[in-house]
Structures are given as C-alpha cells and as structure tokens.
C-alpha cells in the first residue's frame, strides 16, 4: 500500500498508522524511508497510537477527545509533560537535607526535588543555567559532582501526563466525581 502511495512521488503523504502490525525491523526501515522522504522535501503526516514514534517526527500534535492539546517538537512535548528537564546529579558523598532544601529553593527548579539515593539528587529544571546552579549548591556544600545527566521521560508517560493535565479533562473528572 505504501509503494502504491509513493509511486507517483506526491509532495504530501498522509499515512494512517503505517507501522501497525509490522515487525520492529520493518518498522525501523519504514521510519528511515519516511525520514528520507521528509529530507528530500516531501511533507509526511503520520497518525499513530504508538506514542513512542513521536521521537521520529519533527513536529508532533497530541490529540485527545477531538482536540489538539499540544503541538511541538518531540523535546518540547517532553518538557511540557515534565515541566522542564529532569536532571540527575550524583555527588561523591551523601547530600544533606539542607542542601536539598537549598536546591529546591533555586529559581528555575520546579516544585519537587527527589533523593533516590543518599548521594543523588533529581530535580526538574528550567534550563542549563539552573542545572549549573544545582551543581554549584553541591560544590558549595563541599561535595564533588561526579555525574550529571538528563533523564528522558518515557513517551507513554508524556502522553498520560499531558492528557491528564488537559483543563477540560480535569473539570470533567471533578464533575464526574473521579
């Protein structure tokens, strides 16, 4: 079906769930071909329920209940779902409660700071400058930072968070008692 669609070299290609029911090897080849088409000037529009395929796209529209909730690049959707970038910072020793509080009080650090291990802090930050400020807090506390990385939110989680935050969905849940 895809070959029949492409044989006339259309400038715009609309595909409805093109990867449904195909194996992972063929799926990867299909996305490679779609990227090649887009790279050669074709417009490729894909609908899919496999939200992980958003990573293959330049622009993603998230639809629910017949409404467009978000339209952004994949990284923009991840940031919208998380409220920023989730960074994990590892120090060379235990991080004291006061240092965690100081990190939580920094401008650009979102509402929660987690400590999954005594020497690890995870925070959602607005930008790289805020990540630098988190590192500076640890350094000022006499700790050496041994690793800093960005944690990537799973696409299914991105979808769930964005849909659950939709304003009218929250209103309906309250009205329905759930």
Image (cartoon, grey):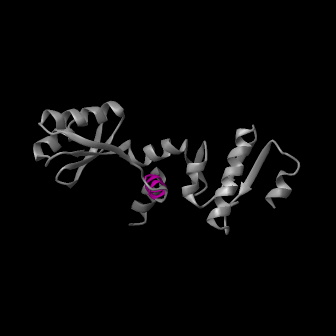
In the rendered image of this protein, does residue 159 appear above or below residue 127? Answer: below
Task: State the residue at coordinates (24%, 36%).
Answer: 135
Image coords of residue 7 (percent x, y)? 87, 51
Q: Nearer the viewer, residue 60 or 18?
A: 18
Task: State the residue at coordinates (88%, 48%).
Answer: 8
162 vs 59, left or right, is left
In reply to whether residue 104 is colored magenta, the answer given is no
Task: State the residue at coordinates (35%, 33%).
Answer: 128
Q: Quadrant of the N terminus?
A: bottom right
Figure label count: 0
Image coords of residue 94 (percent x, y)? 13, 49
93 vs 22, left or right, is left
- Which stretch appears magenta? 157-165
Question: Which residue appears farthest toward the top when viewing the image?
Answer: 129
Task: State the residue at coordinates (55%, 41%).
Answer: 73
Image coords of residue 108 (percent x, y)? 30, 35
Magenta stretch: dominant SS?
helix
In reply to whether residue 164 is colored magenta, the answer given is yes
Question: Which residue appears farthest toward the right when viewing the image?
Answer: 8
69 vs 4, left or right, is left
Q: Nearer the viewer, residue 20 or 80?
A: 20
Quarter-of-image position of residue 176: bottom left
Q: Quadrant of the C terminus?
A: bottom left
């Amino acid at each position: 079906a895809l070959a029949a669609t492409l044989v006339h070299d259309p400038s715009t290609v609309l595909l409805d769930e093109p990867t449904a029911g195909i194996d992972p090897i063929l799926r990867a080849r299909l996305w490679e071909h779609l990227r090649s088409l887009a790279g050669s000037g074709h417009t490729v529009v894909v609908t899919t329920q496999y939200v992980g395929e958003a990573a293959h796209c330049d622009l993603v529209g998230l639809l629910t209940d017949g409404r467009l909730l978000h339209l952004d690049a994949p990284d923009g959707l991840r940031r919208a779902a998380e409220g920023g970038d989730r960074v994990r910072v590892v120090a060379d020793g235990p991080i004291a409660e006061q240092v965690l509080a100081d990190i939580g009080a920094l401008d650009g650090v979102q509402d929660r700071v987690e400590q999954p291990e005594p020497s690890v802090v995870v925070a959602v930050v607005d930008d790289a400058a805020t990540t630098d400020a988190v590192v500076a807090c640890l350094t000022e506390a006499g700790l050496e930072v041994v690793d800093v990385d960005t944690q990537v939110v799973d696409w299914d989680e991105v979808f769930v968070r964005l849909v659950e935050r939709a304003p009218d969905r929250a209103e309906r849940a309250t009205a329905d008692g759930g």
